[in-house]
Image: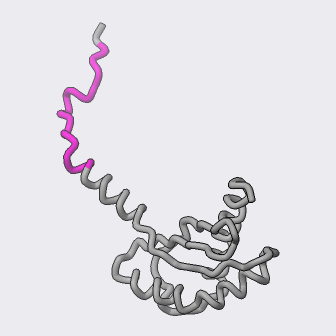
Amino acid sequence: MSKFRIDMISEEVRREIDQIIREDMHDPRLGGTWCVTRAEVTRDLRYAKVYVSILEDDKAEGVMAALKSGAGFIRRELTHRMSLRYTPELLFTQDKNIAYGVHVASLLRDISPAAPDNESEPNNDV
């Protein structure tokens, strides 16, 4: 199977899983701010690694537990929504890239030198 087709299937799986979790799962542990950032489907369509970004660290454990316990339900719903030869087994992983990016941005903001007020304005007295 071509890389392009696998990428298209992975994106469609990501979109459908996000929609299934938001609309059909009614688990109270899924509160807070989270997002399905990407899904990587293997070439044989047997497994899909689903990355979930959780912005609130105190709720991360509950959200991941809810997703792992609801993986069978999500897979069954995915079977009904997509027509694939095999519905992939879902492996949920916490994606910490967004939190890491926020951390790096705050570090860069802290070390950047503050510009003095009179140097920040250009001199247009010509």
Magenta stretch holds residue 29:
no
Residue at 42 percent of width and 62 percent of height: 98
Is residue 84 found left or right of 106 in the rendered image?
right
Q: Position of residue 50 (x, y in %)?
A: 56, 73
Is 115 situated left or right of 19 in this image?
A: left
In screen coordinates, is 105 left or right of 72? left
Q: Give residue 87's position: percent from left, percent from top.
A: 72, 79
Classify residue 26 as left or right of residue 33.
right
Q: Which residues are magenta?
A: 108-124
Identity of the residue drawn at 72% across and 85% down? 77
Q: How is the image coloured?
A: one colour
Count the numbered circles shown.
0
Q: Nearer the viewer, residue 110 or 5?
A: 5
**Is 109 colored magenta in this rendering?**
yes
What residue is rendered at 59% in x and 66% in y?
40
Q: Give the camera-side residue of 111 and 86.
A: 86
Taking 99 as reference, is 119 above or below it?
above
User: Could you say which is closer to the camera, residue 80 or residue 109?
Assistant: 80
User: Which quadrant would the N terminus be assigned to in this image?
Assistant: bottom right
Quadrant position of residue 101: bottom left
Q: Position of residue 122 (x, y in %)?
A: 29, 21
78 vs 109: above or below: below
Report x, y in % for residue 5.
74, 58
Which residue is located at x 30 percent, y 54 percent? 104
Q: Is residue 70 or residue 47 the one in the foreground?
A: 47
Q: Quadrant of the C terminus?
A: top left
